[in-house]
Image (spheres, grey):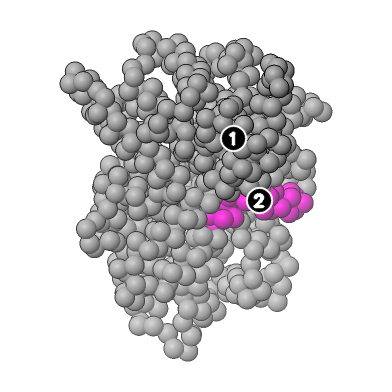
Amino acid sequence: MTRELGELLAALPPEADVAEADAQRQLAELIAGLAQRPTPVNRLARFWVLGSAHAKIALAYLVHWIRSSYLSADALDRDRNEVQLRAAIKLVGSMGYLRGVMVKVGQTLAAYPHVLPKTYAEAFGRLHFEAPPMHFALVREQLARELGDEPERVFAEFEREAFAAASLGQVHRARLRSGERVAVKVQYPNIARTIDADLRNLLALMAPLRLTRQWSSLRQLMDEIRVIVTREADYASEALFFERARELFRAEDGIVVPRVVRAHSTSRALTMEYVEGVHLEAYLRGNPPQAERDRFGERIMRASFRIAHTGRFWYADSNPGNYLFMRDGRIGVLDFGCCREFSAEEWQYYVETLRASVHGGEALRRAVLRGAGFDPEHPPSEPHERFLVELGEWYSGYLKHEGPFDFADEAFIRRGIEMLTLIGRKGYFQSLPVNVWISRQLLGLRALAYRLGARIDMRRLMYEESAHLLEGA
Amino acid sequence: MRVTADTREQTRLAILDAARKLFVDKGFEETTTRDLAGVARIATGTLFNYFPSKEALGLELLAGECAGLADDSRNSADDSGVALEEALFALVMRYLRALGPLRPAVGAIVECGLNPFATPNGAAAECLRTTHLEQVRALVSARVRQEPSFLAMHLYWTLFLGVLVFWSRDESVGQEETLALLDQSTRLYVAALRGDGNSKEAQYDA
């Protein structure tokens, strides 16, 4: 299952879901399959394979402890020692950074249907990354290093408990000396470097795949993953995207991108305006009226189109946690850690595909073939070509729809799931790398609009947001 | 010439000052007793009248930097009401801050003089160990509602020394790798102390 597919399925009723335990079993099988030799499947072995230097030191000391405890303890103590030892070993093997790399890599690899066999991607796709939670003493140390002083002195108020998890860290409410309420995102120490080092180890673990035909794509995509992880870990880069996005919206758009407080932001701490609102599930529990859901849905779509078509960068993280439904009807867009610049070539490809999507027919056929890395004059097999065209029509179909498009239509979502499943089953993996980002965002938006049950006039919206790109199309 | 108590104390302080400078600038292992005597302006043999070995001198230096932490009531008050993991983390951070000026030398001194398998290195080492472990014992007793066993204290001490040695050689920005190691080590210790895997770490299983 791809990440996109996972998002779509998650949007459907629960019976379509896959059991978490099954996903974890598959993950263990994945590791076993990758190694194809005396396999590091148990936790301790995986720890040695992937653990970073400091973890090894901790384990070395643990071994010292074991030895000395057995020398010094009397028989009555041994039972208790063994219990403690088992607990300790279990915990060493499940420490946060190891979990971090497996889950982060897994989640990202799952976004690449092109290279991973279905069972691999399926296990990865069910995992969600969270950095280890930090107690306040650790948050204080981290912020003191980043902001030059302890949070109690930097801010007029700082809440000790985090109110939200964030990519690679957590978020605390605070108040500036000016009285403004802010949210402070704090990164778990050293997590980016740990993940980067462990990614290299993971690639080494995947060595048995190097003789397969997918290896070069896999290498290329692992590099892409490292770029993503590095970027997500760089809050200074995220602050730039926040500011670029914020400039794109006016008050009448009803779209709020929080202001970054530069004076209290670094590459590992990000302070931004606090936005009051609720996430999707909480919003839906209030049984909001259709018109309101439609308006929120349109604002979410508009934000995405504006960022891509006017801001010329791609916001590829449309999961529900990144949107806040505000009481006054505005939508808050949070977390710009997963943004990507278009290269000139990619931008040209994107605009051409957008125009072709409006036209349909032969223009769309040629665009989807180019997007899949084929020369339109030398297409792949007829079934493969037909599949690509149908997938392109599914992606762009709502642009031909007059009036509000009903995203609550379950048949529409199921059709998408069927086609995305076929990618894995038929081996139709070939695609331009930029499509990973584009499809991730488009499918994320669709899943969101489905859960919201929104009806949106996508054609009108597209022309409002993209007239400058569609001229002459 | 009769050596007064004042003169003796001044000489002792001069040796400690020399050690603080040389251990950091030149490295603990590379510094000889001859170097120390030269900077302290005493004869090499005189140094041994004050400290039986270079290791003992290093430990005396560490103990001196940490002396103020023994009854730090303000910080102890801050720890009340927080979980054991956090209280231990905060305690160790106070030691790291106190030892900050000696950071490059701490690893070598600890390895020579404080590791569980080292030969006893005098009163300073024992005082440092006892004082620190008393603080840990108090934090544990107040939260786990039982006196920690010898084994539990030994485990703590090995993790603490591991953190000290690692921190001393940590080249990451702001020693953030040490923060992560300390966080994980204190969580590991608390979970082992409780003899179960039901701490927050259990949810991190990959």
Nearer to us in this view, A1 or A63: A63
Nearer to us in this view, A70 or B22: B22
Residue at 40 percent of width and 33 percent of height:
B118
Q: How many marks?
A: 2
Q: Is residue A419 magenta?
A: no
Q: What stretch is highlighted in magenta?
A: A228-249
- Secondary structure mainly formed by the magenta segment: helix
Q: Position of residue A19 (x, y in %)?
A: 29, 43
Q: Residue furthest front?
A: B1
Q: Mark number for residue A406?
A: none
Is the residue marked by circle 2 packed among few (<14), some (14-19), or many (20+) residues within 10 Å?
many
Picture quadrant of residue B155: top left
Cβ atoms at labels 1 and 2 below 8 Å apart: no
Residue at 37 percent of width and 63 percent of height:
A204
The residue at which mark 2 appears reads as A238
In the rendered structure, the residue with mark 1 lies on which chain?
B
Q: Is mark 2 on a helix, strand or loop?
A: helix
Picture quadrant of residue B10: top right
Residue at 57 percent of width and 48 percent of height:
B30
Distance between the Cα atoms at labels 1 and 2?
61 Å
Nearer to us in this view, A38 or A467: A38
Q: Is A87 left or right of A2, judged from the image as shown?
A: left
Is the residue marked by circle 1 packed among few (<14), some (14-19), or many (20+) residues within 10 Å?
few
Where B161 falls versus B169 (above or below)?
above
Nearer to us in this view, A30 or A151: A151
Give the mark toward the camera: 1 or 2: 1
- Report the amino acid beneath label 1: Gly
The residue at which mark 1 appears reads as B45
